[in-house]
Image (spheres, rainbow, N blue to C red):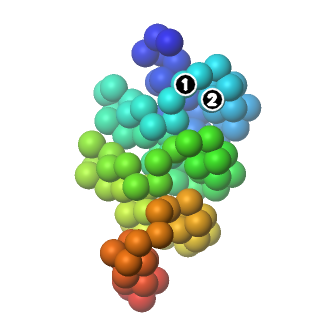
């Protein structure tokens, strides 16, 4: 895969182009790859711009719900909270590993 493929998938996630995101995932683009210039993942982009269905699709296809984005130093869950995306927070909870630290963090997010 060329770097353009990663960039194109990131841009598709940011703009809500589900068809193009599906195309790239089907053709082997890693959903956890961070855009080489923006240093963020397609999952964080879809969350930032409120594309719930794309976020769900990426999670269903292996996107890591706890991967830290290098640019803003946020996890997908932190991005969802920062942009007040409660529906996405609920979905991320379902895809996140269950451990007490994560559960405490989620309770904290819901209270604030």
Residue occupying the point 52% across, 54% down: 47
Q: Say few, some or many: other residues with alpha carbon within 10 Å of mark 2 (under 14 / 14 to 19 / 20 or more).
A: some
Residue occupying the point 40% across, 55% down: 66
Residue 17, visible in the rendered structure: yes
Residue 60 circle label: none
Q: Secondary structure at mark 1?
A: loop
Which residue is more in the foreground, 99 or 7? 99
Residue 8, visible in the rendered structure: no
User: Which residue is at the far top?
Assistant: 2
Q: Quadrant of the C terminus?
A: bottom left
- Looking at the picture, how far across and down is residue 26, in whole percent? 68, 26
Q: Is residue 18 left or right of residue 12?
A: right
- Looking at the picture, how far across and down is residue 39, in whole percent? 32, 36
Q: Is residue 50 left or right of residue 110?
A: right
Residue occupying the point 47% across, 63% down: 97
Q: CA distance from mark 2 to mark 1?
A: 5 Å
Q: Secondary structure at mark 2?
A: helix
User: Which residue is at the far right?
Assistant: 19
The vertical placement of 60 against 92, above or below, is above
Which residue is more in the foreground, 78 or 94? 94
- Looking at the picture, how far across and down is residue 15, in whole percent? 59, 39
Q: Say few, some or many: other residues with alpha carbon within 10 Å of mark 1 (under 14 / 14 to 19 / 20 or more).
A: some
Marks counted in the figure total 2
Q: Is residue 101 left or right of residue 10?
A: left
Residue occupying the point 42% across, 84% down: 107
- Mark 2, residue position: 25
- Mark 1, residue position: 29
Contact between marks 2 and 1 (CB within 8 A): the answer is yes
């Amino acid at each position: 895969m060329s770097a353009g493929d990663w960039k194109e998938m990131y841009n598709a996630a940011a703009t809500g182009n589900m068809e193009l995101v599906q195309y790239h995932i089907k053709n082997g683009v890693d959903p956890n790859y961070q855009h080489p210039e923006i240093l963020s993942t397609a999952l964080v982009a879809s969350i930032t711009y409120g594309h719930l269905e794309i976020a769900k699709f990426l999670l269903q296809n292996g996107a890591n719900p706890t991967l830290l984005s290098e640019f803003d130093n946020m996890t997908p869950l932190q991005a969802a909270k920062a942009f007040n995306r409660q529906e996405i927070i609920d979905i991320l909870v379902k895809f996140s590993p269950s451990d007490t630290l994560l559960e405490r963090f989620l309770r904290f997010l819901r209270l604030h």
